[in-house]
């Protein structure tokens, strides 16, 4: 796989889909996350200097968790990413305001873990740089709280050592999972491509078999007569000529070589008309009604001819006309032109 294809595959890899973030189990985990935040907030309210700020922070963090599992292709929307970063900074600032300057904090710093998990999933949803920006904001706010509370800025930063490790693991996890997803997508694409190639090969093989069957049906009886040493009279020569014209039509005018046109062309040749059928398009119109109108016009033109020459040509795509039927008998020339939908043009 080339570098460009690898990059394209990575861009298409949707990690949140692989983790089923939009499923019921994921939503149940969010509920558990919200309940845990509420329990920790209530359980530690007695050690806080300003409990109300902690309750507001808990609501902000919980609402942001609901936003993070919202169904949306990765990368996570920029506007929602800004909301997550704002929530992390706001909740960190409010908890820094609520925390006491002295005493054991215990689980009162629950917001650090909760915000880290928000940033973890932000990194998973292809916003790793912003997730680390959020971690930097939280570290700065926590360090500032430690310094203002007399505990020391270093103490505030060391409170985040485990959380930084968790975010690092999340960042690496997302990268590895994206690469794995890209490989899986590439394998699926190759499988689909191989299946399509196999189907095309099988279709081509069936076409060849059909043409061999057609050739055998019209040519073998005449070849058997030649092999048997039968004297060629005028009737046989006439049949040889008609068979040769039929085979020529099946090659040069394949898209128009349907039974109705073949029968009309054969009858016209029996009347002495020189018939030429050309397919310069390479494929019949996909619309059945269009093909039916073209076949009807061709049969009508061949049936009207009593002598001279009739040329039926299916034109290449992109031209104003799709089919022309030119009948020339001496000085009389009749031309019929059909548009792409098979209707006559003026």
Image (cartoon, rainbow, N blue to C red):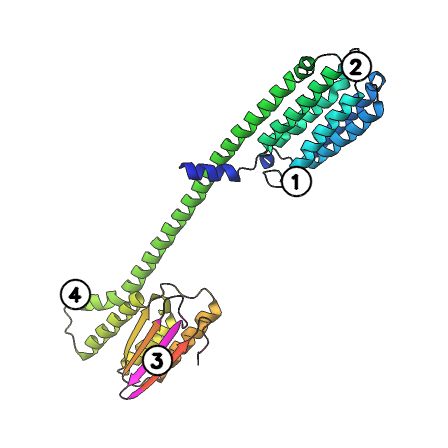
How many angstroms separate mark 3 from mark 2 (CA)? 102 Å
State which mark lies toward you, 1 or 4.
1
Farthest residue in the bottom direction?
Answer: 331
The reply, left or right, for residue 102 in relation to residue 190 is: right
How many angstroms separate mark 2 from mark 1 (CA)? 35 Å
**Magenta region:** 314-332
Q: What residue sits 64% from the left and 24% below the top?
A: 136
How many angstroms separate mark 4 from mark 2 (CA)? 112 Å
Q: What residue sits 67% from the left and 29% below the top?
A: 118
Quadrant in which the C terminus is drawn = bottom left
Q: Quadrant of residue 100?
A: top right
How many angstroms separate mark 1 from mark 4 (CA)? 83 Å
| Of callouts 3 and 4, the N-terminal one | 4
User: What residue would you read off at disc 3?
Assistant: 302
| Of callouts 1 and 3, the N-terminal one | 1
User: 330 or 77, which lies in front?
Assistant: 77
- Looking at the rendered structure, the secondary structure element under dot 1 is helix
Q: What residue sits 39% from the left and 47% below the top?
A: 197
Judge whether residue 315 is colored magenta: yes
State which mark lies toward you, 3 or 2.
2
Percent coordinates x, y for residue 306 in the rendering: 31, 86
User: 219 or 116, which lies in front?
Assistant: 116
Percent coordinates x, y for residue 183 in the rendering: 47, 34
Q: Quadrant of residue 101?
A: top right
């Amino acid at each position: 796989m080339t570098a460009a294809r690898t990059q394209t595959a990575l861009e298409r890899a949707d990690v949140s889909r692989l983790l089923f973030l939009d499923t019921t189990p994921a939503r149940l985990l969010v509920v558990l996350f919200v309940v845990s935040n509420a329990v920790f907030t209530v359980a530690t309210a007695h050690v806080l200097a300003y409990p109300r700020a902690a309750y507001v922070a808990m609501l902000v963090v919980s609402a942001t968790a609901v936003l993070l599992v919202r169904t949306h292709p990765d990368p996570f929307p920029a506007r929602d990413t800004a909301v997550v970063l704002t929530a992390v900074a706001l909740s960190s600032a409010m908890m820094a305001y609520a925390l006491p300057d002295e005493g054991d904090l215990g689980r009162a710093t629950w917001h650090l873990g909760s915000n880290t998990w928000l940033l973890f999933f932000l990194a998973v949803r292809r916003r790793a740089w912003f997730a680390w920006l959020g971690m930097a904001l939280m570290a700065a706010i926590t360090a500032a709280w430690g310094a203002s509370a007399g505990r020391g800025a270093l103490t505030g930063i060391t409170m985040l050592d485990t959380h930084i490790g968790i975010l690092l693991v999340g960042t690496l996890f997302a990268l590895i999972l994206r690469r794995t997803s890209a490989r899986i997508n590439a394998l699926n694409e190759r499988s689909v491509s191989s299946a399509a190639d196999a189907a095309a090969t099988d279709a081509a093989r069936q076409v060849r078999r059909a043409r061999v069957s057609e050739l055998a049906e019209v040519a073998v009886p005449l070849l058997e007569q030649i092999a048997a040493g039968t004297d060629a009279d005028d009737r046989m020569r006439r049949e040889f000529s008609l068979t040769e014209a039929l085979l020529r039509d099946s090659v040069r005018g394949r898209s128009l070589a349907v039974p109705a046109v073949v029968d009309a062309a054969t009858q016209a040749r029996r009347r002495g008309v020189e018939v030429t059928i050309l397919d310069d398009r390479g494929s019949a119109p996909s619309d059945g009604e269009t093909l039916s109108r073209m076949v009807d016009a061709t049969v009508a033109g061949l049936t009207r001819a009593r002598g001279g020459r009739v040329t039926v040509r299916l034109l290449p795509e992109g031209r104003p006309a799709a089919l022309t039927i030119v009948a020339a008998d001496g000085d009389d020339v009749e031309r019929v032109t059909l548009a792409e939908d098979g209707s006559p043009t003026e």
